[in-house]
Image (cartoon, rainbow, N blue to C red):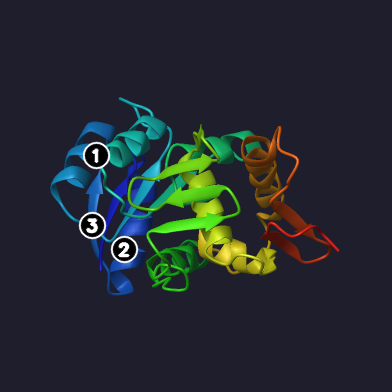
Amino acid sequence: MHILVIEDDERITRFIGRGLEAEGYRVDLAHDGQEGLQRGIEIDYDLIILDLMLPDTSGYEICRTFRRKHIHTPILVLTAKDGLKDKLSGFDHGADDYLTKPFAFEELLARIKALLRRRPTYEEAPAVLQVADLTLDRTSREVHRGTKTIALTRKEFELLEYLMAHPNKALSRTSILDQVWGYHHDTMTNTIDVYIGYLRKKIDGGSNTKLIQTVRDFGYKISDARPS
């Protein structure tokens, strides 16, 4: 497995690089945003570790550029910013996971393994998913409710895709974290609720039929049946 680390703090890059190499990973180091961006575009990495606070450019901008160029390599963001808004912004710009500094190498390694593992659970779903009058095209990444086109962020799309791949099925918070955010634990449950709120406004706002439903003390589901 080949990992790119984009981080300007040489102490941190040495710490990460040595640790990952000891675990058998091949590691490339980039100490500024432009070098990291060029490497990430030219080389097909298995994972990118990206610091948000770089000397020459924003990590958010790098993340957004990768996604705009259709580079879907998993991105793990490292930053000293630990606010919920910062985390949500990172996800909206295309990040797959978020780890705040300081961190234990064991946690970094666990998150890397989670991002690298295969997630085939819903990848074999049809190209076009439909629940009632809501359609999601996985190829064009377009979403429509009736005749209305709905614009979604990357993470909103991934969450809706997972829900629609399992229509009428209650999905636990744990499974949502696992499949959409790549976590095995529940530290991000508040983030799930925030994103469900975003989807409800965009998908169900103004409609008499509410498709996104809460399953009390469990999670969420998408269904055109009225809640019991």
| Depth order, front residue of 190/220 | 220
Task: Identify whether 46 is placed above or below 83.
Answer: below
Query: Where in the figure is residue 137, as x and y percent of width and height?
Result: 41, 50
Where's the C terminus, which quadrant? bottom right
User: Residues under labels 3 and 1: Cα distance?
Assistant: 14 Å
The correct choice, above or below, for 17 with respect to 148 in the image is: below
Q: Residue at x 42, y 32 (%)?
A: 53
Residue 202, position as x, y percentages in the image? 62, 36
What residue did someone put label 1 on?
69
What residue does disc 3 label? Answer: 45
Q: Rounded to the nearest whole Å, what is the CA distance between mark 1 and mark 2?
A: 30 Å
Amino acid type shown at disc 2: Arg
Q: In this image, 203 relative to 10: left or right?
A: right
Residue occupying the point 71% across, 32% down:
206
Callout 3: helix, strand or loop? loop
- Residue under pointer 2: 18
Image coordinates for residue 122, horizontal then vertical, percent? 46, 69
Residue with the most extreme left position? 42
The kind of residue tagged 3 is: Tyr
Q: Mark 1 or mark 2, which has the lower sequence index?
A: 2
